[in-house]
Image: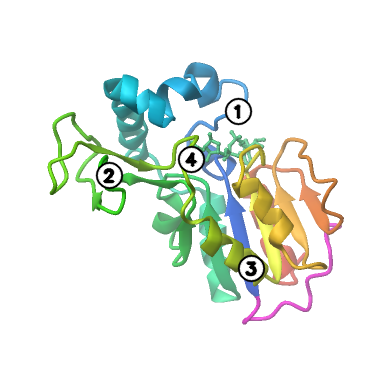
Amino acid sequence: MINIPDLGSLHSKSKIVFLSGAGVSAESGISTFRDNGGLWEQYSIYEVATPEAWASNPELVQRFYNQRRKQLLEVEPNAAHLTIAELQQHFDVEVITQNVDDLHERAGSGKVLYLHGELRKSQSSADPALVYDIEGWEIKMGDCCEKGSQLRPHVVWFGEMVPMIEPAQELVAQSDLLVVVGTSLNVYPAAGLLHVARPGVPIIAIDPAELELHHFPAAFHIREKAGTGMQKLKHHLLGKG
Ligand code: OAD
């Protein structure tokens, strides 16, 4: 038995919202951003993840995301993604992910909201409403949308609007349990989603590192990697441990 809040009142119609970050995909072999050796130690955010970077060196930005996309084709969902998907058999599960990988979907999660875009898609640099699936891993300079503008990665860069934040807030506001997995909670507005949970709704964070959770009296921290942490949470939710 782990010492987490009593979740015995949850039933098949209860809504469990997972807010995931890079840590949920770490055990699949995808680097996180802010851990030792993370992507933001190897690259500058300002050179690869801002509209200014795209304006000044689009080839570098394109190369950065092409590499991420190529890697994505070589990795598989891990136990954490699979356990989250499995819980759909017992609860109304929604996933809000900050990740641009597709591992939740590939694990079988049916309801995934992408807060920061999707690596496997491109968008027109002139009209963000024009979004396309990418065949393979590469967007090449010279690949254009139907209006003739260069295609860029369909990801939200620092300094850009986060169009999916309102639907995400609605989901969290409806949740009966909020589970935060593998995110440092450093990036807003995503981190602000915890404030939207209704008073008294339990918040469970799964992350091996210390997190700033003191604003959330209802929060409980399972200090484990995503795979083992999710396994423990699943057993607890299903009344098996
Ligand atoms: P971070 O790199 O900031 O945080 C990753 C979190 O995962 C940390 O809290 C780690 O302790 C934790 N972690 C590491 N290994 C883990 C494991 N095996 N299991 C569980 N947790 C583990 O990544 P995010 O919080 O996702 O945005 O970053 C948020 C946003 O910042 C990203 O979506 C991206 C980034 O810059 C954009 O690019 C717009």
Q: Earlier in the sequence, mark 4 or mark 2?
A: 4
Q: Is residue 27 among the parts visible in the rendering?
A: no
- The Cα atoms of the two marked residues, 2 and 3, are separated by 30 Å
- The Cα atoms of the two marked residues, 1 and 2, are separated by 25 Å
Q: Earlier in the sequence, mark 1 or mark 4?
A: 4
Q: Earlier in the sequence, mark 1 or mark 2?
A: 1
Image location (x, y in percent) of residue 96: 54, 57
Q: Nearer the viewer, residue 121 or 35?
A: 121
Q: Earlier in the sequence, mark 4 or mark 3?
A: 3
Q: Main secondary structure of the magenta part?
A: loop
Asked if residue 13 is among those painted magenta in the image, a careful observer would answer yes
Q: Is residue 135 above or below residue 152?
A: below
Dot 4 lies on which element?
Answer: loop
Instruction: Give, as a three-letter code, the residue at label 1.
Output: Arg
- Horizontal relation, residue 13 to residue 203: left or right: left
Image location (x, y in percent) of residue 205: 72, 50
Which residue has dot 3 on it? Answer: 16
User: Where are the magenta residues, as a range?
Assistant: 1-14
Q: Nearer the viewer, residue 8 or 128?
A: 128
Residue 28 is marked as 4
